[in-house]
Amino acid sequence: MRIALWGLAAMLAGGTAAPATAFDLTILHINDFHSRVEPINKYDGPCSDKEAGEKTCFGGVARIASAIASERAAAGDTPVLVLDAGDQSQGSLFYTRYRNDDAAEFMNTIGFEAMAIGNHEFDDGVPVIEKFAGAVHFPMLMANADLVREPKLAGIVRPSVVIEKGGERIGIIGLTPRDNQELTAAGKSITFTDPVEAAKREAAKLTSEGVTKIVLLSHSGYELDKRLAAEVPAIDVIVGGHSHTLLSSTDPKAAGPYPTLVKGPDGRDVPIVQAYAYSKYLGKLTVNFDDEGRVTKAEGAPILLDASVPEDEAIKARVAELAKPLEEIRQKVVAEAAEPIDGQRDTCRVAECQMGNLVADAILDRTKDQGVTIAFGNGGNVRASIDAGPITMGEVLTVLPFQNTLATFQLTGADIKAALENGVSQVEDGAGRFPQIAGIQFDWSRKGTAGVDRVKAVRVRNAAGEWEPIDPEGTYTVVSNNFLRQGGDGYEVFATKAVNAYDYGPNMEDAVIAYLQDGNTSYKPATDGRIREID
């Protein structure tokens, strides 16, 4: 019924349009929450009791709730719009157990007003996103998807919505990644389309209905958002996600200023904002519109949700209640790390990384008795770092939340090189397909043509244990995760060229824990030059 009322309101609103007036609007936003219901540490993993006591943790949904309530109270007469740019799903035991039932509850309580659908909303199939979208009290948006084969989802999800604020109508368009076709199983029943064309279509529709202020809620990534700003007429603000980008005008580590201004097709500057990920920041942008709906000023900053921001006590108590069934699993110590194990996104999606080596070495070790000599992982499969000291099951599951399983198969050397070419083809975008490997070495260069000739050399071990060039016509036995095996992240060569494929079955996390426990010693992370970027 709620969805029907939204649709009716939009239809009625499209009849006659009241003259626009100048006004200010504050946009509060998050993106890529990834089920960080509880506070996180500096590695984006679970906050320990010790770290909490030292007040070195960040975020969590109770702190987000408190910060949003505080900003609403401080806004006075300025209207406030609360948005989520996608990927609430996947990343902790809360998602593993509750499949976004908890996310819907918390987002409704906080009062979110619209959300773009991210790629990870599809991780466990269309029924999960259908349930999520049906449970929330706000529209979930996705303009660049053909849902004709998913009529139930089409009845819940909308391409855009109009929300009234301070007597003014604000159009909001949602975008999801076009490469959901490769990133998710949803590609089997949903056709994902060009985000630029979809945004143009929806912006034109809203403009024809008299809407003069349009926000693009875009789970597309920072680089594509800059293109959208430059090419799509009538877009006033872009609130982004997907690339986990920190934008800030004061933090030297930020990828760009907050807001980033890009000249639109009509010559106006379009502000773009994004607020990193994992609940560490709440984005805050205040925009002034003139009486024609044009942005005349946009300013703000990401708010760091550190220990100085109090947690909402009621939500904190509810989180603790939901965490009780998870506690025994999460607190079980399974191994020990001699040093922190780096699994940061900024490392594992552009180069060899410690966590990528651990996972690849572990799955190769698990299958070596089957004649496997090469392991393939992907940087996007690694979701967090682990600090030094005892390693808990909860930490391992935060690193590997997808419950992927091992798969073995055979490929020619030429096909393995093709897989590596795919792996480094989108490194500039920080894509999750970047390869993390074991039993193989390769050199690559950004100067080559993406997907064609960036990989300059590939080496494998011979019978004497020495490294030698891979034989393009030779056959090699490979282990990977079931997501890549089925062609995920662009590894189509695994799905189409694999021989003697066997979906072996053990979970990735089980293989990693067994490897960590082997020899009963403290694990010391390292990189060894198996992946080299050259000029």
Image (cartoon, rainbow, N blue to C red):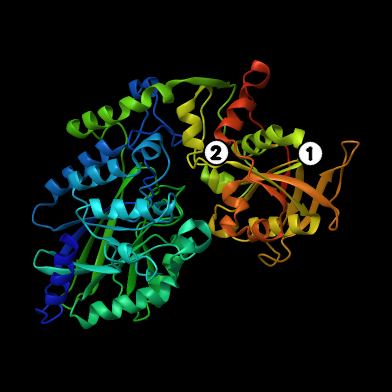
Residue 305 appears in the figure = yes
Residue 400 at x, y percent in the picture: 51, 38
Please indicate whether residue 528 sits to the left or right of residue 203 in the image. right
Residue 142 at x, y percent in the picture: 34, 65
Closer to the camera in the image, 442 or 119: 119
Q: Residues within 10 Å of mark 1 (few under 14, many from 20)?
A: few
Q: Which residue is drawn at 12% across and 58% down?
A: 78
Q: Which residue is the site of mark 2?
A: 343
Q: Residues within 10 Å of mark 2 (few under 14, many from 20)?
A: many
Secondary structure state at the residue bearing disc 1: loop
Amino acid on which the number 2 mark rests in the picture? Gly
Q: Residue at x 60, y 39 (%)?
A: 505
Question: In what quadrant of the picture does the N terminus appear?
Answer: bottom left
Find residue 417 and report its image quarter. bottom right
Find residue 280 and report its image quarter. top left
Q: Which residue is drawn at 18% across and 80% down?
A: 210
Please indicate whether residue 210 sits to the left or right of residue 320 in the image. left
Closer to the camera in the image, 443 or 149: 149
Q: Residue at x 36, y 31 (%)?
A: 57
Please indicate whether residue 70 sits to the left or right of residue 261 in the image. left
> 57 above or below 129?
above
Q: Which residue lies furthest to the right in this view?
A: 464
In 3D space, how far apart are the residues under numbered discs 2 and 1 (Cα atoms)? 28 Å
Q: Which residue is the site of mark 1?
A: 371
Q: Which of the two discs, 2 and 1, labels the residue nearer the N terminus? A: 2
Query: What is the number of the mark on residue 37?
Result: none
Amino acid on which the number 1 mark rests in the picture? Gly
Residue 534 appears in the figure = no
Residue 86 at x, y percent in the picture: 36, 54
> 22 above or below 496?
below
Residue 74 at x, y percent in the picture: 13, 47
